[in-house]
C-alpha cells in the first residue's frame, strides 16, 4: 500500500468544484487510476503527472497532495476568534449539562426572540458587516431559543412548538454562516439538528427548508449522491400547490441537480435543472419564507457551479453573461453571483474579468472578500498568475482579504 493522496472528493468540497472524473481527464489518466492513488493502492509514476495534478487542483503547497496538511482556507479563518461564541453556543447542548447545577437566567419573551432572529436574518441579507455582526448577534439568539424551548418542555405551556421553530431558524442561519467560512463539519451538525426538533410537528414547509439545509451541507462535504437522494426524498413529500411550496421544491431540485452532477448522474442533473428553471420562471423574485432562496439568479448560479464541476468553463462564463442582477437584489444573492463569476473567469485565466467581478463583490460586501472561501481561492489563483496589468487592483483585494 502506498501513502494515500488527499481525496479529490474533499478537494471538491473545499471549493475547487471538480469531480474525480474531470480531474482524471485533465491530467490524462483514468478515473480508476486516480481512485487507486487516493486510496493508497497506486502511486504517481511521473513527476509531470504530479505537477499537473498540483496545477489542476490549484494547491498552494504541493505537500497538500500527500496529507492535506496545509489548508487553503486558513486565511479565511481570521474570523475564528469572532466565531468562538457561536461554536460554544452550538456545542453547549443541554445534554452536556444534564448533571450541572441549574442556573437562573431571565429569558426573553417569544416575541422578543422572534424580533431578534429577524434582525439576524436582516443582517445576513443586507449588511456590509454581515459576518462579524452576525457572529456577535447569533450566539445569544441561539442560546435563548434553546433555553426557552427546554423550559417549555419541562413545564408544558403551549410554546414548545413556537420556540422550536425559532431555534430551527437560528440553526439554519448558523449553517449558512459556517458554510461560507468553510467550517463544513460544524455546518453539517447544525443542519441536522432541526430534523429532530421538527420530527413531531406538522410544519411541512419548515421541515422541507431544513432538508434543503441538510442537503446543502452534504454537498459542501462532498457527499454528492447522498445530497441528491436526500433532497429528492424531501421534495417528494412536499405539497407544491402554493408559491412557498413551489419555491421550496425548486430549491430542493437545484441542490439535488448539483449533487447529481457531482455523482456523475448527468441525465438526472439536466432534468432537475430543467424542472427548477420552469418553476423559477413562474415565480416572482421575492424571497421565500424560511429563508431558502430560489429564483432565476439561484438557478443560474447552480448551472454555473455544475458547469465548473464538469470542466465546462466556457459554458459557465456564457451563463454568467446572461444573468441580470436587478436593483435591490439582496447582498447575499449579489455576492454569490459575483464570486461564482470571478471563480469561473479565474479558471479560464481571464484575470481582468475575474478581478472586476471580485471588485463588484467587494462593493456589495467587503467582508465576503475577507471571509468567503471561494473569494480566497480565486484571489490566490490570481496572485500566482502575477499579471502585471492587474497587480495594483489585485493588491488592494488581497489586502481586504487579509492575504497581502
Image (spheres, rainbow, N blue to C red):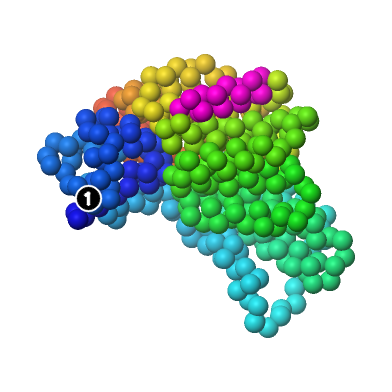
* Secondary structure mostly seen in the magenta stretch: helix
Within 10 Å of disc 1 (Cα), the crowding (few <14, some 14-19, many 20+) is: some
Question: Who's the residue at 53% across and 47% down the image?
Answer: 217
Which picture quadrant has residue 150?
Answer: bottom right
Residue 278 part of the magenta-drawn span: yes
- State the residue position of label 1: 41
How far across and how far down the image is residue 61, in percent? Answer: 25, 47
Residue 237 part of the magenta-drawn span: no
Q: Which residues are magenta?
A: 266-281
How far across and how far down the image is residue 11, in percent? Answer: 36, 44
Q: Is residue 391 visible?
A: yes
Residue 128 left/right relative to 354: right
Q: Helix, strand or loop at disc 1?
A: loop
* Residue 129 or residue 106, whichever sits in front: 106
Q: Quadrant of the C terminus?
A: top left
Q: Residue furthest right?
A: 157
Q: Is residue 180 visible?
A: no
How far across and how far down the image is residue 242, in percent? Answer: 78, 30
Q: How many marks?
A: 1
Residue 1 left/right relative to 204: left
Question: Who's the residue at 67% across and 57% down the image?
Answer: 196
Determine whether 90 is above or below 364 in the image: below
Which picture quadrant has residue 295?
Answer: top right
* Residue 191 or residue 404, whichever sits in front: 191
Q: Quadrant of the N terminus?
A: bottom left
Amino acid at each position: 500500500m502506498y501513502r494515500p493522496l488527499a481525496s479529490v472528493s474533499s478537494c471538491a468540497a473545499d471549493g475547487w468544484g471538480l469531480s474525480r472524473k474531470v480531474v482524471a481527464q485533465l491530467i490524462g489518466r483514468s478515473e480508476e487510476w486516480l481512485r487507486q492513488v487516493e486510496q493508497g493502492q497506486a502511486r504517481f509514476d511521473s513527476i509531470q503527472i504530479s505537477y499537473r495534478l498540483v496545477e489542476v487542483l490549484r494547491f498552494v503547497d504541493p505537500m497538500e497532495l500527500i496529507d492535506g496538511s496545509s489548508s487553503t482556507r486558513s486565511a479565511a479563518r481570521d474570523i475564528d476568534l469572532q466565531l468562538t461564541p457561536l461554536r460554544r453556543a452550538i456545542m453547549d447542548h443541554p445534554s452536556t449539562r444534564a448533571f450541572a447545577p441549574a442556573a437562573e437566567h431571565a429569558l426573553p419573551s417569544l416575541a422578543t426572540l422572534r424580533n431578534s432572529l429577524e434582525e439576524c436574518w436582516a443582517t445576513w441579507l443586507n449588511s456590509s458587516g454581515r459576518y462579524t455582526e452576525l457572529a456577535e448577534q447569533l450566539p445569544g439568539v441561539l442560546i435563548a431559543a434553546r433555553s426557552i424551548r427546554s423550559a417549555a418542555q419541562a413545564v408544558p405551556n403551549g410554546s414548545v412548538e413556537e420556540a422550536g421553530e425559532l431555534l430551527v431558524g437560528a440553526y439554519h442561519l448558523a449553517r449558512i454562516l459556517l458554510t461560507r467560512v468553510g467550517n463544513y463539519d460544524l455546518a453539517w451538525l447544525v443542519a441536522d439538528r432541526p430534523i429532530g426538533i421538527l420530527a413531531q410537528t406538522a410544519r411541512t414547509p419548515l421541515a422541507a427548508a431544513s432538508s434543503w439545509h441538510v442537503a446543502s451541507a452534504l454537498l459542501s462535504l462532498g457527499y454528492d449522491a447522498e445530497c441528491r437522494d436526500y433532497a429528492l426524498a424531501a421534495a417528494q413529500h412536499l405539497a407544491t400547490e402554493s408559491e412557498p411550496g413551489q419555491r421550496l421544491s425548486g430549491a430542493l431540485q437545484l441542490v439535488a441537480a448539483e449533487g447529481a452532477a457531482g455523482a456523475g448522474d448527468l441525465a438526472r442533473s439536466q432534468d432537475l435543472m430543467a424542472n427548477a428553471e420552469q418553476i423559477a420562471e413562474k415565480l416572482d423574485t421575492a424571497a421565500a419564507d424560511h429563508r431558502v432562496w430560489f429564483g432565476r439568479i439561484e438557478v443560474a448560479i447552480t448551472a454555473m457551479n455544475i458547469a465548473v464541476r464538469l470542466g465546462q468553463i466556457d459554458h459557465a462564463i456564457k451563463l454568467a453573461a446572461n444573468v441580470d442582477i436587478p436593483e435591490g437584489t439582496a447582498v447575499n444573492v449579489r455576492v454569490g453571483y459575483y464570486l461564482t463569476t470571478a471563480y469561473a473567469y479565474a479558471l479560464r485565466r481571464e484575470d481582468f474579468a475575474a478581478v472586476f467581478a471580485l471588485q463588484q463583490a467587494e462593493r456589495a460586501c467587503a467582508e465576503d472578500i475577507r471571509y468567503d472561501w471561494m473569494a480566497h481561492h480565486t484571489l490566490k489563483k490570481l496572485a500566482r498568475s502575477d499579471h502585471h496589468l492587474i497587480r495594483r487592483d489585485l493588491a488592494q483585494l488581497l489586502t481586504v482579504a487579509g492575504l497581502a
